[in-house]
Image (spheres, rainbow, N blue to C red):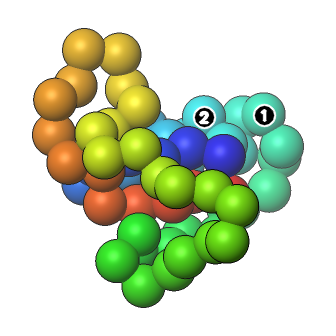
Amino acid sequence: MYVVCKEHLEIAIDRFVDEYEEAPDLYALSEVSFKEWDPPHLCEEKGCKHEALFLVI
């Protein structure tokens, strides 16, 4: 699972495909919520300070 900004979306998709050998599901964080999980506010890519917008699972 990756939580990323628009700029790092392609990298997260590539990483997911490399790891699981299948296409991920993509969700806009503004459209999903989970009872037991609060998504990070910032992109998880190292050094990135942009707002997290997408969930790649």
Real-space CA distance between mark 2 and mark 1, rounded to the nearest whole angstrom: 6 Å
Kindly tell me whether residue 10 is visible in this rendering. no
Q: Quadrant of the C terminus?
A: bottom right
- Residue located at (16% from left, 40% from top): 50
Q: Is residue 22 left or right of residue 31?
A: right
Residue 25 x/y as whole percent: 65, 70
Residue 22 x/y as whole percent: 80, 56
- Residue located at (51% from left, 80% from top): 32
Q: Examine the rendered structure and indicate whether residue 25 appears above or below residue 10.
A: below
Q: Which residue, given by chain and number where applicable, does mark 1 sit on?
A: 19
Asked if the residue at tag 1 contacts the one at tag 2, i.e. Cβ–Cβ closer than 8 Å, the answer is yes
Residue 15: which disc? 2
Mark 1: give few (<14), some (14-19) or many (20+) Cα within 10 Å. few
- Residue located at (41% from left, 31% from top): 44
Q: Examine the rendered structure and indicate whether residue 6 appears above or below residue 25.
A: above
Residue 3: which disc? none
Among the 4 quarters of the image, the one containing residue 45: top left
Q: Amino acid at mark 2?
A: Arg
Kindly tell me whether residue 20 is visible in this rendering. yes
- Residue located at (24% from left, 54% from top): 6
Q: Depth check: 12 or 43 in front?
A: 43
Q: Depth check: 45 or 18 in front?
A: 45
Residue 28 x/y as whole percent: 40, 74
Looking at the image, the residue that sits furthest to the left is: 50
Mark 2: give few (<14), some (14-19) or many (20+) Cα within 10 Å. some
Q: Amino acid at mark 1?
A: Glu
Dot 2 falls on a residue whose secondary structure is helix
